[in-house]
Image (tube, grey):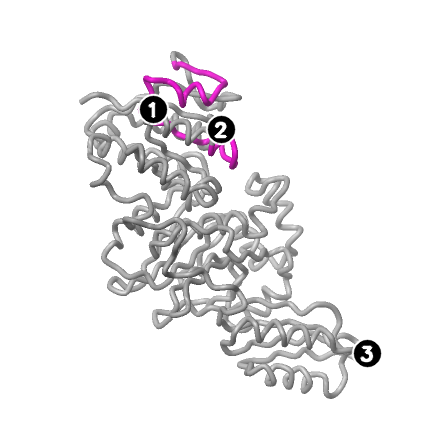
Amino acid sequence: MKPVRVGICGLGTVGGGTFNVLTRNADDIARRAGRPIVIEQVAHRSIHPDCDITGINTTTDVFEVANNPNVDVLVELIGGYDMARELVLTAIANGKHVVTANKALIAVHGNEIFKAAHEKGVIVAFEAAVAGGIPVIKSLREGLGANRIEWVAGIINGTGNFILTHMRDEGRAFEDVLAEAQALGYAEADPTFDVEGIDAAHKLTILASIAYGVPLQFEKAFTEGISRITAEDVEQADNLGYVIKHLGISKRTDQGLELRVHPTLIPKERLLANVHGVKNAIAIMGDAVGPTLYYGAGAGAEPTASAVVADLLDVARDISTDHHYRVPYLAFSGIDEDVSQLPIMPMEDIITAYYLRLLAVDRPGVLARVATILAEQGISIEALIQKEATEGELVPIILLTHRTKEKQMNEAIREIEAMADIAGPVTRIRVESLSEGE
């Protein structure tokens, strides 16, 4: 059969990995696709040191690839928002299929891109945009297609998981482990996207859209980072039988959909609690299949390239199929980009349990007043740890509450922080059991 001709835009870490996997495994890929997949052109600013591009048509202009009539599929690996959006829309307007690893692009501009692609009858594939080499999008979109998805919860940022893992295993401070992650190349010089949950929110937005058949709504995702987590919090969570993980969580409720990224205490026995280092894992609860877990490398050159090339295989198989008979971009047919039957819930309406850590003057009646404030908001205490202190010292008080609404907890924390005997802000970490019954 006629070869599928690919134009790769970006020859950095993922682009270089994609180039090498395509060339190294060309024979196996052709057998799986039923036709050869060949590299027609590469656009790059710098050449990846592990790539031999001898004999390859190269350019420094990515739009040259988008306008190249010999390119069937544009592989967008440049990252970012604006230029990537323009590049992809140009390729689509020229009737080219698109494969991308750009989660920010899909989360923010995906509704526009999928609409344009549908009108042109071309494929936009984005498996590598979430969790690197883990085929979670294909599993959710196709393998779990018979299920009503109840919830999705995942460790979908390796940098944050690396930091929390080393904080727990070695008792180190956040800043110390972050510096190591930067030295090892796991974290950027500006780590905001990773440690403040923005990267994970991009990925969760995509997963939730596929899981529930709603438009992409990144702007409604709640995000909270891990920079305020201390070694004390990690130790106390362990004492209570929990592990702190930076999770992306989406749940279907009677009121709508939860879409939130934040530090979370989960029981030690949960599989997600035992995912360490830079690895990713996503747990999905389906009404028919029950709980499933998808684990593996969430980033890196060849793990991510594995997902990019898998998308190219799908494109090669479906390129001659009428677009009306292809798997929909976001799993469901007819998603309205303006109207959703499942609204995204505001964070203040979310119900969960809480871990609270506060510093109090070691004085009679302080703990009783804290308990009263919680009770007045309808919040009951499940567990309490209070360390002894010498006279005049501030004593840490650790509380674990039963499930309550975020709005009530916000009010209780406001009143507790206003107490004269409480020093500094109250640390609040949400608690999830992620059990089969939820």
The residue carrying pointer 3 sits among few (fewer than 14), some (14 to 19) or many (20 or more) residues within 10 Å by Cα, namely few
Residue 69 shown in magenta = yes
Nearest to the eye among marks 2 and 1: give it: 1
Q: Circle 1 sits on which residue?
A: 6
Locate residue 422 relative to residue 190 in the image: left or right: right
Which is nearer the N-term, disc 2 or disc 3? 2
Q: Which residue is mark 2?
A: 12
Identity of the residue drawn at 26% across and 29% down? 29
As drawn, which residue projects farthest toward the top? 55
Residue at 39% x, 29% y is: 75
| Magenta stretch in the rendered image | 56-85
Image location of residue 276, percent across then percent down: 48, 54
Q: Nearer the viewer, mark 1 or mark 3?
A: 1
- The quadrant in which the N terminus is found is top left
Q: Secondary structure at mark 1?
A: strand
Question: Residue 243 appears at what percent x and percent y?
Answer: 51, 64
433 or 120, nearer to the observer: 120
Q: Amino acid at mark 1?
A: Val
In the displayed structure, 256 sits above or below 360; it is above
Q: Secondary structure at mark 2?
A: loop
Q: CA distance from mark 2 to mark 1?
A: 17 Å
Identity of the amino acid at label 2? Gly
Earlier-in-chain disc, 1 versus 3: 1
- Which residue in the protein does label 3 denote? 392
Identify the residue at image location x=48%, y=48%: 202
Locate residue 201 relative to residue 208 in the image: left or right: right
Residue sticking out furthest to the right: 392
